[in-house]
Amino acid sequence: MNILLFGITRDITGHSKLTVPANAGVSTVKELKSWLGQQYPAMQTLSSLAVAVDSEYAEDDDAIHAGQEIALIPPVSGG
């Protein structure tokens, strides 16, 4: 499963793309967020983290599959 990262999520990981191993037990958005928090504890400090699956915002209970385009949408500040 390949994940696209932007903004601070890219800064935290040091990568613009991540690969989640097939044996990581990730099959929902919630499980992906949990896995990311375990791999990169700084992810847990973000005020929010949205996930897009095939260019649509996804909810925590939504299933995700290896062939889908998955992107992390970090919080955005403005002024």
Image: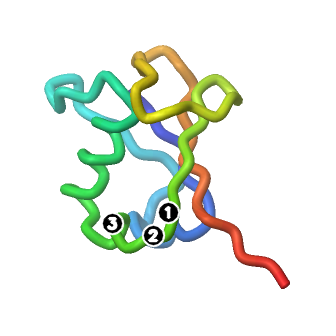
- Label 1–label 3 contact, CB within 8 A: no
Q: As displayed, is residue 42 above or below residue 71?
A: below
**Residue drawn where x is 60% and y is 36% of the image:** 52
What amino acid does circle 3 point to? Gln
Which corner quadrant of the image does residue 38 belong to? bottom left
Residue picked out by circle 2: 46
Question: Alpha-carbon distance for marks 1 and 3?
Answer: 11 Å
- Using a 10 Å C-alpha cutoff, classify the residue at mark 1 as few (fewer than 14 neighbours), some (14 to 19) or many (20 or more): many
In the image, taking residue 76 as reference, residue 22 lies left or right, namely left
Residue picked out by circle 3: 44
Total count of labels? 3
Where does residue 42 sit, x and y in percent of width and height?
Answer: 33, 72
Question: Alpha-carbon distance for marks 1 and 2?
Answer: 9 Å
- Label 3–label 2 contact, CB within 8 A: yes
**Residue drawn where x is 31% and y is 22% of the image:** 27
Which corner quadrant of the image does residue 13 belong to? bottom left
N-terminal-most mark, 1 or 3: 1
**Residue drawn where x is 58% and y is 60% of the image:** 74
In the image, taking residue 40 as reference, residue 8 lies left or right, namely right
SS of the residue under disc 3: helix
- Label 1–label 2 contact, CB within 8 A: yes
